[in-house]
Amino acid sequence: MYFTDRGIEELVDRRGEEHVSLSWLAERLQVFVDLNPEFETAVDRFATWLARDDEDE
């Protein structure tokens, strides 16, 4: 298990039953990057990966 898995597990435990829009997620990611600019590249790569996840189907 990676260290980051703990955060993912906490997210599922706390908010696993919630439904959110991609617009809400994008807004939260933008706020996170504004507060933590050192993660801009990682968040950008993650967002791009999510956006293109279905290209192979």
Image (spheres, grey):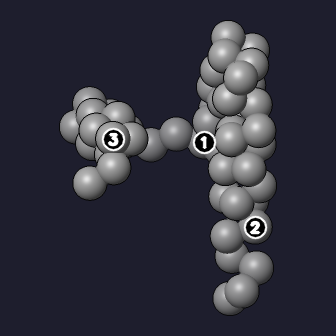
Q: Secondary structure at mark 3?
A: loop
Work out which quarter of the rendered image holds the C terminus and state it.
bottom right
| Rendered location of residue 23, percent (x, y) | 70, 37
* Nearer mark to the viewer, of 2 and 3: 3
Which numbered disc covers residue 48? none
Q: On the image, which quarter does residue 42 sit in?
A: top right
Q: Residues within 10 Å of mark 2 (few under 14, many from 20)?
A: few
Q: Separation of disc 1 and disc 3 at Cα?
A: 27 Å
Q: Determine whether 24 is above or below 36 in the image.
A: below
Q: Separation of disc 2 and disc 3 at Cα?
A: 26 Å
> Mark 1 vs mark 3: which is more N-terminal?
3
- The residue at 66%/16% (across/down) is 36
Q: Secondary structure at mark 1?
A: loop
Q: Amino acid at mark 1?
A: Ser
Residue 11 horizontal side relative to residue 57, left or right: left
Residue 4 horizontal side relative to residue 30, left or right: left
Q: Residues within 10 Å of mark 1 (few under 14, many from 20)?
A: few
- Disc 3: which residue: 3
- Disc 1: which residue: 21
Q: On the image, which quarter does residue 29 sit in?
A: top right
- The residue at 26%/54% (across/down) is 1
Q: Secondary structure at mark 2?
A: helix
- Disc 2: which residue: 52
